[in-house]
Image (spheres, helix red, strand yellow):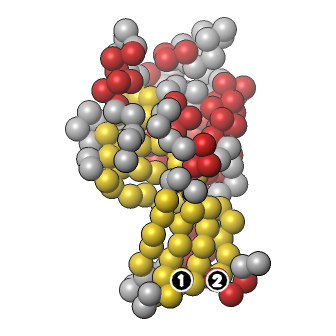
Amino acid sequence: MGLVEHEELQAREPWPLPGWQDLGDSSVRGGNVGNRSKHDHSCWEAVVLAARERAHSRQAFMVERYGLSGDVQYDWSMDDAQITWSRDGKVFLTGRLTVIGSVSLAQQTWLWSWANESIPDPALGGMERVRQYGEENDYPVLPWPGFKSDPELVAEARMVAASVLDAEGLWAESVDGVQLHFMVHDLALADERP
């Protein structure tokens, strides 16, 4: 699939990857390189809480409205940033994918899609806005190219990213020891497509 290996991220950086314990220090991985002050963690927690509530309600709505449970098959492509769902071989739903990032299971690291040169442009969507949002608000994690993979931190990162880009839902897929995390946009029933 040509994904940039997470080992390359560690090899490029002379310091260890930040993790959960580093959230109080925005200077880790160059949070906002010009501002080395600590971020307001309570503000970050409020953003995460709102994003979590939004993601849960949108995900439940997406699954219920479009019947995305049971005997549903899906097919996706990063090349054209598309996902389709089908039942009995007939496509009933299409959507646009944005790659949020990936987790290397062997290295236990997260890599943002905007920092991964092998992600095709169509699949990047507006991910640069997520990085900018993190920098502008001095939030941790969002402007770091990568970090140690902690399940809670990965969940926070993907839910905040989905909120920033107003995603309709989240999707994940494991391929060759890598978890790929996506957000889903522009859902359309097959009979509603132009």
Q: Check disc 2 and report its element: helix, strand or loop.
A: helix
Q: Are marks 2 and 1 in contact (CB under 8 Å)?
A: yes
* Screen quadrant of the C terminus: bottom right
User: What residue is at 38 percent from the left and 58 percent from the top?
Assistant: 173
Q: Residue furthest left?
A: 106
User: What residue is at 42 percent from the left and 91 percent from the top?
Assistant: 88
Residue 181 placement (x, y as % from top left): 46, 51
Q: Check disc 1 and report its element: helix, strand or loop.
A: strand
Amino acid residing under circle 1: Val
Residue that badge 2 annotates:
190
In this view of the protein, can residue 161 be seen by the observer? no
Local packing at callout 1 (Cα closer than 10 Å; few below 14, some 14-19, many 20+) is some
* Above or below for 16 versus 136: above
* Above or below for 28 versus 6: above
Local packing at callout 2 (Cα closer than 10 Å; few below 14, some 14-19, many 20+) is some
Q: Nearer the viewer, residue 152 or 117?
A: 117
Residue 91 — which label? 1
